[in-house]
Amino acid sequence: MGDDSEWLKLPVDQKCEHKVWKARLSGYEEAVKLFQKIRDEKSPEWGKYLGLLKKFVTDSNAVAQLKGLEAALVFVENAHVAGKTTGEVVSGVVTKVFNQPKARAKELGADICLMYIEIEKAEVVQEELLKGLDNKNPKIVVTCMDTLRKALSEYGSKIVTLKPIVKILPKQFESREKAVRDEAKLLAVEIYRWIRDAIRPSLQTINSVQLKDLEEEWVKLPTSAAKQTRFLRSQQDLKAKFEQHSAEGGADSDGDDEADTVAAVDPYELLEAVDILAKIPKDFYDKIEAKKWQERKEALEAVELLAKKPKLENGDYGDLVRALKKVVGKDANVMLVSLAAKCLAGLASGLRKKFGTYAGQVVPTILEKFKEKKPQVVQALQEAIDAIFLTTTLQNLSEDILSVMDNKNPSIKQQASLYLARSFRHCTQATLPKSVLKPFCAALVKQVNDSAPEVRDAAFEALGTAMKVAGEKAVNPFLADLDKLKLDRIKESADKVELPGGRKGGGGGGGAGDKKSAAKAPPTAEAPPKSSAPPRKNPAAATSKSASGPPKKGKPTSAAGGKAKKTSDNKEVIETELSIEACEDLAGGVLPASCLQQLDSANWKERLASMEEFQRAAETMDKGQMPCQALVRMLAKKPGWKETNFQVMQMKLHIVALIAQKGQFSKTSANVVLDGLVDKVGDVKCGGNAKEGLTAIGEACSLPWTAEQVVSIAFGQKNPKNQAETLNWLANAMKEFGFAGINVKGFINNVKTALGATNPAIRIAAITLLGVMHLYMGAPLRVFFEDEKPALLAQIDAEFEKMQGQSPPAPIRFNKKAAAEEAGDDGEEQDEDGGAAGGGGQDSMDLLPRTDISEKITSDLVSKIGDKNWKIRKEGLDEAKAIIVEANFVTTNIGELPLTLKERLGDSNKILVQQTLNILQQLATAMGPGLKQHVKALGFPIITVLGDSKSNVRAAAMITLQAWVEQTGMKDWLEGEDLSEELKRENPFLRQEVLGWLAEKLPTLRTVPGDLMLCVPQLYACLEDRNGDVRKRAQDALPKFMMHLGFEKMTKAAGKLKTSSKDQVVAMLEKARAVMPAKPAAPTKAGGGKDSAEPSRSASASRSQPASDDCVDSKPEVKKIRGGAAAKKGAAGKKPPAKGVKDEEDKSGPIFVLIPNAKEQRVKDEKQLKILKWNFNTPRDEYLEQLKTQMSTCFAKWLQDELYHFDFQRHVKAIGVMIERLESESDATISCLDLILKWFTLRFFDTNTTVLMKVLEYLKLLFAMLNAENYHLTEYEANSFIPYLILKVGESKDGVRKDVRTILTMLCKVYPASKVFPLLMDGTKSKNSKQRAECLEELGCLIEGYGMNVCQPVPAKAMKEIAVHIGDRDTSVRNAALNTVVAVYNACGEQVYKLIGNLSEKDMSMLEERIKRSAKKAAAAPAKPSVAERTQKENPTNPNATFLRKPAQEDPNKLKIMYRTYRIQARQNSQHSESSHPSIPREFQLDLDMIERDQSRVCEMPDLVQHKLDELLEPIMIPEPKIHSVSPHFDELHNSTASTINFVISQVASGDINTSIQALAQIDEVLRQEDKAEVMSGHIDQFLIATFMQLRLINSTHMADERLDKRDIIKLYSCIIGNMLSLFSMESLAREASMGVLKDLMHGVITLMLDSRVEDMEDGQQLIRSTNLLVIRVLEKSQQTNMISALLVLLQDSLVTTAGPPKFSELVMKCLWRMTRHLPETIDSINLDRILLDVHNFMKVFPKEKLKQLKNDVPHRTLKTLLHTLCKLTGPQILDHLSMIENRNESELEAHLRQVVKHSGNLSGLKSDRGNEKGGLRTDERMSKAKVSDILSEIFKKIGSKENTKEGLTELYEYKQKYSDADLEPFLKNTSQFFQSYVERGLRMIESEREGKSRIQTSAVIPQHGVDSSLTSNNEELKPAVYYERLKILRQRQGLENTSRQGGGGVEDEPQQRPPISSLLSSKPSVASSTDMLHSKLSQLKESREMYQQEHNAHSNSPSHTHTRSASPAANLDDLKKRLERIKSNRQ
């Protein structure tokens, strides 16, 4: 009991996992009750049991397990998180429950599985149950099948995927266990109930007895369709519907929906694909070419056997198809032809859509082979071609079929027609549009009249089938020329046709019922009809290649019958020709009797009166009652068109126009009057009325038909005036009607005739007409006239040139009858095709004369292109290219070229691949729209090339792909599985290119084929691809897929993914849903020349056009961002001319309308979600429409039109007006501010820089105005603008980035910086590295300017996000992040490390180093932004001004390290820089930098007049108080120049040599003046960084650049070395260099010394000697600790990496030896702890053993000598300096030091005097002679060894120097004379070498220069001299030489200055090398030093003579005054 009471107290979840089964049982019981009580499915209580649920079902105790199963079932039913446990729980159920003997346990287990299915986990459950079928325990197998059967029975075949079940079912029928076989039978019966006969093919392999049993069971099943009885959680609406039907007893009403389910299952999908390519006999290709027919038969039989497999694996069947095609086409044995045809049929059936690639190659051959009459051959060919049809589309085969319809062989024509009839049966109204049907009908109509009866019968059958499928309404217009008997025959055939699947045809009027039935058929799943699409005209689809030739001259009546009519003939009743008597009767019924009587009166006045009555009657006549033909025949009654009175004639022509406009005017009526109209068109008085009549007939009967008749009649006459005016009328009519349907070929001959006419008016009219046609057709039109005379061709080209850049005007007239008819079907056709091209342009491509090049693609050429030798292959490709180029435009038949080129796309030679791609580009242009049929064969191989590893090949493939898509549209690329198959390839390059291409193309399509869904699984796979670029492209493409497929479909597809993947994908889908672009509307495209918009639409659109010529200027290719509304406006009609004038007048009014509370209302609407929130990645049409609507109320109409115009120049103009009105309409501007800012965000998505710069200009002025008005942005305004502004901060153009930074600076004055901060933080997440870097820089500036409070939401979170960027790949981002963290460090000190959190060791070391280098002084006073802001508000200035004072931003080659500091200072100082020196006028500060930089300030010199310059003539006395008063201003000036120094230093690292030299010259000027040199303090590290960066740049780039003059490089090197020598002459500045910088500097300088390229250059040796001198100077003058540390680190790096020069390490070690020698003098100033730490780190990397393994032992000896010397100098105390080493055991340092100290014995007591001027150690008397003997013995051993001779001699020399009394005789006496002389000679050489170096060092000492060096001890005396010195420099720059320097007397008073480096910039080319200049400069400095010493003595003797400049101070000041006047006059 004690145990019981123990577990009874436990909580439920712990009971459930207790070891005692009773406890678990109790826990399960309580869990059931608990689970039933929890009402919230998302309660946290459920989470406790997630890990326990599997134990519930797998409990080892049977009793407890039963209760556990109940608890699990309740859990799964109610818990929201239950789905996470599906896999493990179902697996447990299968293995531990289904094997239980208790039926209740199995029942509960099955219920759990079914419940998991209900909560949307069907795939996982099914997967686990199928795994259970492989279990060895038959009980488990039986129960698994039973559960699957129940699931299928309840949920149906849509939820339970049948394919994997059907796949394993035959195996279960073979089981030994009867129970398993019986259960398999039950499952098979259940499957049959759902998919009927679709299961049969999969079960053909089972035992025949079993199959028979199944057949019997299947027969017993009810015929009604199976229905789903249990529903998923997401199907609750269906559940409710089902329950309602069940309750009403009307379940049958759902039959239609369920029929869908049955039809949707395709047996093919349930089959496993078989790879037959691997099984084809190896000798097949040899046998198929064998001469013996038996061998060929064997080969074919082998393939036939394989091809019978019902489903084939996809692969490259090209070779096999080619071989079979050859047999069909060329084999003489008809039996083999039949066999090959059967093979092709098998392949087509097994591959289905995948065979579509080869269809275009095979169909022409089969059609030609129909000439065979043997039934077995014909039948085999029919089976093959029928199977092939199902793999492709009728449109793809149309060219091939039409080409044989005119064949001379009647068998071929018959079989082609029968093939069409069979093909039509598989089509629907949607897949058989008018554009496809029209050419077929035209060809079949011809065959109806054929002499062969079998051909006629076949044609009737085909036309009847077409009528049945498409409907009479669609087909009748094409049958207008057939008589009633033939029409009846066609209708009879239509009635006999039975469509597959019991479908109804389209003959019943094409109602919705037809479309519904069509939608159910499998083929229509790909392209469902769009009955909801608005009516829209699309002439492009309506106009196809005419089946008949051009009309004959002079026979206008017969021309109508010979041509295939435009679709505008719909509803047109062919009016029969009436007799004259019938006409008189009809006319008499509607016209007054007097009118008819006077028509032919001899008196013209009576005829005129008659016409007036006629006109009145016509005007009042009702349209339906007007007998048009009768009326026009009355007008034609004698005198008819021969009327001599022009007034009567004018009236007559006007009445013709009136009748055509008002009545139902037929072509029969038109034929009556056209002759008369054309005859009068050239008449001076009647011509206008004649043209009006022609235009009216054009509207009634369509322009294409009217134009053909009119032109034929005109050129059948000989009247040149009529011909010219007819062409003029036609040119104008084309503009008014558009180009749609115009048959170019019909006009070409007539236009050519006109061009050759002798009358110039005809030629001019013809050229004008060609110009108008060129507007629509473009360049292809010229092809027709290339053979014209050069002079005429020049005129045509000139006319074409005029039209360049113009867009065709939108049509304003339309064919009345066709306007409503054509829109629907043709519009749909255009949409499905992807809207590839505009109307006229597309038609023109169809009309071009094309060449058939198939005969030129010979077998020799094909074999050449496929040759093994790449050179021959290249020759073949060159020939193919030449054929295409020569043909210019080609037909779709290009022989075997497609398959041949396809092979070359996979060529191993990438040059040939690119050449092939180039050919395919040319082919696209040459073939035009006909290219569609080659998409499968050649298009998709282009996509395969996108996976190539070479970027240039991929780029070429993408260009080719775009060229193809331009011709074909997107529909063919998206149909079928080909695209998804390409995406299945796990090639990251291919995937990212294809996804990027789809993301670009999909948003432009209105509809896509359903097959796009096949790409979704691959898209999801790409979302999880290992390659980051693939993932990014997939994420970008996701919304574009969703816009077509819908969120629901894509979410459902995601359900098939694994659980881990599914969650991620669904989350991405939710994000994509928010940014999903809208489908493009059905816009009437600008300038398309399309008859596409109703007049009302045109009129409404025209109101948005700002000027009458806008429709001509508008460009159809304008980007979407310029406004959805703008895109819709391009089709606007003509505007009245007065409108433009009116607009001009209106522009004088206000541009903005101030509406009270309008902005507040907009904010309110957005919050209430009444309007879209302004948040997008790229602007969609709905945003543009919304903004336009909002702007319409408060923007002037004309301004809004300008802002939404297509032409960017109109935008610039509008912004210019807004700038002008900014001040005058400030209040109204503020009231519309949100809309203005939103419109500007749209411009940020434009690519036009001109507009962008204008926008930024306006924004700067706008924010300045807002600041002046004390206006603060609202959240609503800021959030809709600032994020998009931040996008542009990463712009590649410097000018844009500069302006954006300016605006961001100004933003903080009108919007809190703390709110700008988070938006900038979001900007750091961009993928654009420039944007990240700039945002980080701005964040740093905000922190610097406003403190840590600006970091929102909390500093810690912000800093962690910023610190992440320290590890960024991009250098600029890293630097920006480091600078920002440094700014935080400056603000809050060490706390920054807590804020940034954990960083990687590498990032932390970078940060620490940057913080150390930070030039910020702790003592600097903090800036006060509040004061600055107040000052700025009091004195508002031009917003450009602040940034004009930032030179660092104007130079693109700035150093990021220095730039940030400068930018922050500029930001803080810019606001009060005007008043930086209040007591001294700016002009008299004589600041050189300011004078150079700001010319405008110096130009204000007239202020000089205010000062009394006469006082300058008085002798100058500089008393103490004046000096003190000037001093503060100098300090202030000194601080303000930091930014200038930063800028100049940044230019040192410039990539431009001259810029760098100029900067070095400026720094040299500062360094050589003592008073100015001080300002470099704090900038030394920056300067040295810039210097070694320039050294690296020279070494890596400039030296390798052959274009650069090597003398320039030498000059730059000389400048750098001269600067360094100057810098390192000043110890105070030299000591500022940090260790890291010294290391990099030494690396750069030593690399220079070892650069062999420099040695080979002229003066290179001198340069290297100067560099050697610089190295010595750096070693001496630098801070010694830093120097030694730098050398140790450099040595370590050089030994680790072997990439550097071989002697690099050697030179570093020489430098260390030198430092070691000087240790006795420098030991007191050295930080021993740090040196030892560096040695410790060195020895960690290179232990003693590792050092000895190096090629030589010099590194080991170097380190040993350094440590030995340090031990000697410090003794045992050196062991106290190991404090900085954390773990001393990591290296051998401590042990080595102890050994040396111990070995040295009493060395610690023998320290010499370190202050000794010689710097040596004196020998202590106590030193034992034995010790000396040991040391010398060691040295002589080294001299005696071959390797260490030189080192030994050096040590011996140093020993003698230190111990001058040392006796070497004992060691030399026993050696040979040769050895003794060798030692003496070696010591002499060392001595002479060292003396030489010391001489150089002595001569190279450069003193600090100043005006007077004696003043350095007194800082206060020095400061007044600053202004004098500046003035002197200014005088020299203005050409005013100092007289004291020209004369000889100034030497004592003023030391001669060394020439500045700027002298190196002399333009004289004859100057010696820069190294010579350096040496001359050094000699001058030496002399100046001597003079300086003399002067110093003189000053010390006479202290009162402090500052003498010349003999007469007064004279000198007079000279000064003159110079000042001269400067003043020059500046003015």
Image (tube, rainbow, N blue to C red):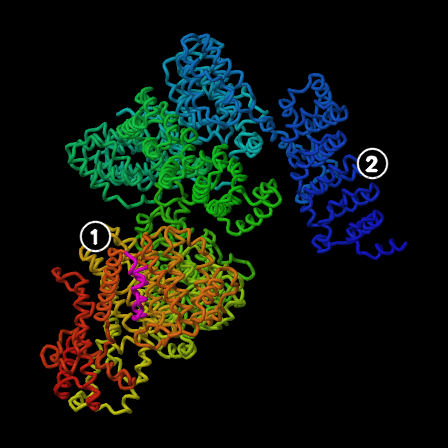
In the rendered image, the vertical position of residue 16 relative to residue 1440, given as above or below: above
Tag 1 residue: 1656
Tag 2 residue: 102
The picture places residue 202, in percent across and down from the top left corner, at 63, 24
The picture places residue 1039, in percent across and down from the top left corner, at 50, 47
Which residue is nearer to you in this view: 786 or 1483? 1483
Work out how far the residue at label 2 is from the one at label 1, CA to CA, in angstroms: 97 Å
User: Is residue 2028 in sight in this rendering?
Assistant: no
The picture places residue 1487, in percent across and down from the top left corner, at 25, 77
Horizontal placement of 1543 versus 2009: left or right? right
Query: What crowding class fits label 1: few (fewer than 14 Cα within 10 Å), some (14-19), or many (20 or more)?
Result: few
Q: Are marks 2 and 1 in contact (CB under 8 Å)?
A: no
Name the element at disc 1. Answer: helix
Of callouts 2 and 1, the N-terminal one: 2
| Amino acid marked by disc 2 | Lys
Quadrant in the picture for the N terminus: bottom right
- For the record, the magenta segment spans 1848-1871
In the rendered image, the vertical position of residue 1012 relative to residue 505, given as above or below: below
| Amino acid marked by disc 1 | Asp
Which residue is nearer to you in this view: 1019 or 711? 1019
The picture places residue 1989, in percent across and down from the top left corner, at 20, 80
Horizontal placement of 775 versus 1283: left or right? left
Among the 4 quarters of the image, the one containing residue 63: top right
Among the 4 quarters of the image, the one containing residue 897: top left
Which residue is nearer to you in this view: 1709 or 763? 1709
Q: Which mark is residue 111?
A: none
